[in-house]
Amino acid sequence: MEVALVSFALLVVATLYSSVGHGGASGYLAVMSLATIATMESAWLKQHAWSLNLVVSAIAFYHFRKEGHHVIKLSAPFVLGGVPFAFLGGYLAIDGAPYDTVLSVVLLLAAVRLVMPTEMDSRGGSGGIGFLPCTLMGMGIGLVSGVVGIGGGVLLSPLLIVSSLGTPKEAAATSALFIWLNSLAGILGSVTTSGLALEGWTIAPFAAAVFAGGWLGSKYGSKTASERRVSLILSAVLVVATSKRVLTLL
């Protein structure tokens, strides 16, 4: 019964997150941490969350790219900077509590900023910030993602949008690719230092649930939802992710 309930919760999380190009790791971590079937060990939780991320972000990228929202020059610097540092973050055995405090503040500010009217640059690309600064930002997001156990989409998406580097849907496409590669790098880093913690009997039903949610959410977000609606959904996602981290710190 618990597996069914957890699977349903993961399906809902995947639907919501994938509509804005996210994998949903922060939501998966929250759900699995509340389940008795979880060992509560960081390596177990991270590797399972990253594995689910791989499923959902791949589907999200497929849908957003299919609709023409992926801009390669927007993705390139963040991917080049983020992936190696996601591996490093996954390799390092660091307590995530200090990062949770910083992330809670950053995510909340990003959520507030996203609901405010802003002029979006529909051209995409690395804009006036430059390739090197974008690469450095990718490094920072990748490192935090690896340590905490997420793909980094909740950090990258608002950065792309509020900096006018791309539209919400372009940000979603780039975030989906960024999340997939970061999640793979994080798993490899974690396995290198902690060994393989994945359990087939657990990951199979969970993966099926997030596959369904990821397909529904990303199809809606990439094709049906308006740019403004995607921004509002992303804001809601950030608030949920922030609330989860605040509760963890209490």
Image: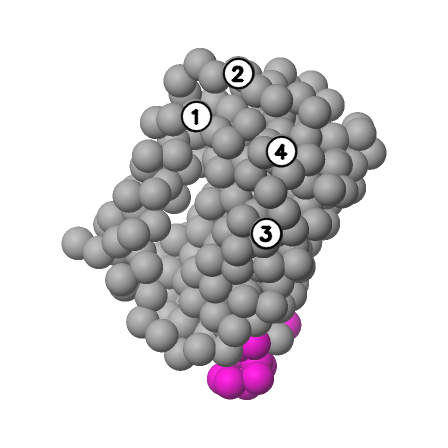
Mark in front: 1 vs 4: 4
- Classify 10 Å Cα crowding around label 1: few (below 14), some (14-19), many (20 and above): many
Say which mark, if any, is on residue 23: none
Q: Please, what secondary structure does the residue beneath circle 4 have?
A: loop
Indicate the quadrant where residue 63 lies: top right
User: Do residues under tags 3 and 1 come within 8 Å of each other at their CB atoms?
Assistant: no
Which residue carries the number 4 mark? 127
Calculate the distance from the C-alpha at mark 1 to the C-alpha at mark 4. 19 Å
Q: Nearer the viewer, residue 9 or 232?
A: 232
Amino acid marked by disc 4:
Gly
Name the spot of residue 160 as percent of width and height, x first: 55, 36
Say which mark, if any, is on residue 132: 3
The chief SS type of the magenta part is: helix
User: Do residues under tags 1 and 4 come within 8 Å of each other at their CB atoms?
Assistant: no
Q: Please, what secondary structure does the residue beneath circle 1 have?
A: helix
Amino acid marked by disc 2:
Glu
Choose the circle earlier in sequence order: 3 or 4. 4
Which residue carries the number 1 mark? 114
